[in-house]
Image (cartoon, rainbow, N blue to C red):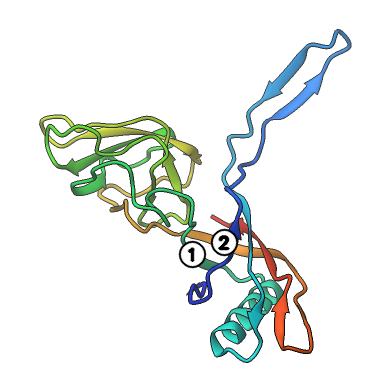
Amino acid sequence: MAAFPRTVPPARVTYPKVIGSLISVGQSGALQTRSEAAQGRMWQEAWPALPAGSEDVQELLVTIEDLYNTGATCSLSHYLLPGSGLEANGAGGGTPLVNGADQSGTSLITDGWTASAAVRMKAGDCFTVAGLDVLFRATADISSDGSGNATITIEPPIVAGSSPANNAALTIASATLTAIVLDYGSATAGPDEFIGGLQVTFKEAP
C-alpha cells in the first residue's frame, strides 16, 4: 500500500465524518434510533491553484487518478486529528501493546505504558494497532496504573472477528488512515497553466 503524496499540501480539509445512526420516526413523532457503530470515516481535501509544470503537482494528479481508477488503498495522515497529522494531546510514554487476544467492542485493554502516569492519552487522540487497518480514537482520557496497564475507550469499536493479536503494538504518533479515493473534482487549467478546482473525497477503507 502506497503512501499518498504530501509534497503539495491542500488548502482546505474537512473534519472526518463518521457513519451515522439509523433514525426512524413513528406515527406519534417519537424517534427510534439504532447505532451503526460502524468503521469508515469520510473527508474532503481541496487544493489551491497549482502550477501545471510542477513535477510534484503531476505526481499528485496521477496518484489521485490511479487510486480512483483502480480502487486501491493508500495510507495518509489527517491534518486535523491529534495523534495523526497533529501532535497528540496525551503524553504517551512507554511502549503500549494490546494486552490479551480476542478483544472487541468499544474498549481496548493495553499494557506497556509508563507506570503510574497520568494522561497517557487525551480524549480525541488517535492511534492504530498493528495488524488492523483502522484509525481508532480515544473517547476519554486515560492514565496508567502501577504496572503500566490502561484500558482505552475507543471509537469506532473493534468488530468481532477482527480482534488484534496479543502484544500488537499501538502507534500513538503520526498514525495513518487506510483510505480510497471515493471521488475527485476535475481540475481545470487556464492559459497561464495553473490548475484550479482539484478536490478529493477520501473514504477510510479498514
Q: Residue 23 location, x and y as percent?
A: 75, 26
Which element type, helix, strand or loop, lies under badge 1? strand
Mark 2 crowd level (few <14, some 14–19, many ≥20, 10 Å Cα): many
> Which of labels 2 and 1 is toward the front?
1
Amino acid at pointer 1: Leu
Lower position in the chain sequence, tag 2 or tag 1: 1
Q: Is residue 72 visible?
A: yes
Front residue of 192 and 54: 192
Residue at disc 2, secondary structure: strand
Dot 2 amino acid type: Ala
Q: Badge 1: few (under 14), some or many (20 or more) residues near its Cα, within 10 Å?
A: some
User: What residue do we see at 18% from left, 46% from top?
Assistant: 93
Residue under numbered circle 2: 179
Q: Position of residue 97 (x, y in %)?
A: 25, 47
Q: Which residue is found at the position 23% from the left and 31% from the top?
A: 143
Q: Which mark is residue 76?
A: 1
- Residue nearest the observer in this picture, 79 or 176: 79
Q: Position of residue 203 (x, y in %)?
A: 63, 57
Whether 108 is drawn above or below 201: the answer is: above
Asked whether the beta carbons under mark 2 and mark 1 sit within 8 Å of each other, the answer is yes
Q: Which mark is residue 154?
A: none
* 111 left or right of 40 in image: left
Determine the residue positioned at 33% across, 47% down.
88
